[in-house]
Image (cartoon, rainbow, N blue to C red):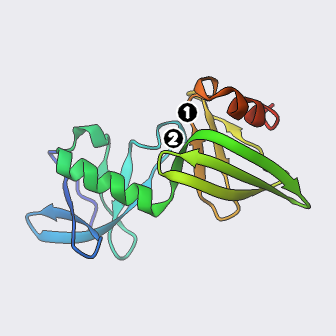
């Protein structure tokens, strides 16, 4: 199936088995989600891909979707684990070659590891992006809005 430009925002739904589907004239097509760049706007520009990993639609802005479609998309993004929004940094401990992070995200508490030479990356629109050893991304949108402990822990690793 080729990429199709949609005249209107797509309709999405979740099946009983948790699969996200694009609903259209051709019926329901199971899709996976892939956030696109820029990471400073990782909740925009979401690629919807078929079983062959071919993009079949693009969501430019989830806010333009109907509430049911938006909820289905948000749930799929959270479950995919591509981007987690950090709201607190609880601890950062270093071991040989690895840094252990304990954080609170909008999706819940998480622990992850980064290499010692991997540092939080400044984003052009502000904020930071951290990539763990498994490839998951952690976004800190407004570092100055974090609590004092979180800021102190984060600033130790930021240029």
Could you say which is closer to the camera, residue 13 or residue 3?
Answer: 13
Instruction: Specify the label residue 66 is tagged with.
Output: none
Q: Position of residue 33 (x, y in %)?
A: 38, 60
Q: Is residue 138 above or below residue 27?
A: above
Against 38, residue 31 (above or below) is below
Q: Residue at x 63, y 42 (%)?
A: 129
Q: How many marks?
A: 2
Q: Nearer the viewer, mark 2 or mark 1?
A: 1
**Which one is nearer the viewer's eye here, 121 or 75?**
75
- Residue 84 in view of the camera: yes
Q: Residue at x 29, y 71 (%)?
A: 19
The residue beneath circle 2 is: 38
Q: Position of residue 22 (x, y in %)?
A: 21, 63
Q: Is residue 45 left or right of residue 68?
A: right
Q: Which residue is mark 1?
A: 141
Q: CA distance from mark 2 to mark 1?
A: 13 Å
Point 86% across, 53% down: residue: 94
Q: Point out the tag, 2 or 1, that comes first from the N-terminus.
A: 2
Give me the residue at 45% from left, 62% from top.
80
Q: Position of residue 119 (x, y in %)?
A: 77, 44
Which quadrant would residue 139 be assigned to in this image?
top right
Circle 2 packing at 10 Å, graded few (<14), some (14-19), many (20+), is few
SS state under label 1: loop
Relative to 87, 131 lies left or right? right
- Figure quadrant of the C terminus: top right
Vertical order, 52 against 109 (above or below):
below
Position of the N terminus, as image quadrant, is bottom left
Place residue 15 in its image quadrant: bottom left
Q: Is residue 9 visible?
A: no
Please provide percent x and percent y for residue 81. 50, 59
């Amino acid at each position: 199936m080729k990429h199709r430009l949609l005249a209107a925002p797509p309709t999405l739904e979740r099946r009983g088995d948790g699969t996200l589907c694009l609903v259209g004239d051709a019926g329901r097509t199971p899709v996976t989600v892939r956030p696109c760049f820029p990471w400073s706007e990782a909740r925009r520009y979401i690629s919807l891909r078929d079983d062959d990993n071919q993009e079949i639609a693009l969501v430019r802005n989830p806010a333009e979707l109907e509430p049911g479609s938006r909820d289905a998309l948000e749930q799929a993004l959270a479950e995919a684990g591509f981007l987690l929004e950090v709201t607190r940094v609880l601890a950062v401990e270093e071991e040989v070659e690895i840094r252990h992070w304990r954080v609170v995200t909008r999706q819940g508490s998480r622990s992850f590891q980064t290499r010692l030479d991997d540092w939080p990356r400044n984003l052009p629109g502000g904020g930071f992006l951290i990539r763990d050893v498994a490839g998951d991304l952690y976004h800190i949108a407004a570092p100055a809005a974090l609590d004092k402990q979180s800021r102190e822990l984060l600033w130790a690793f930021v240029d």
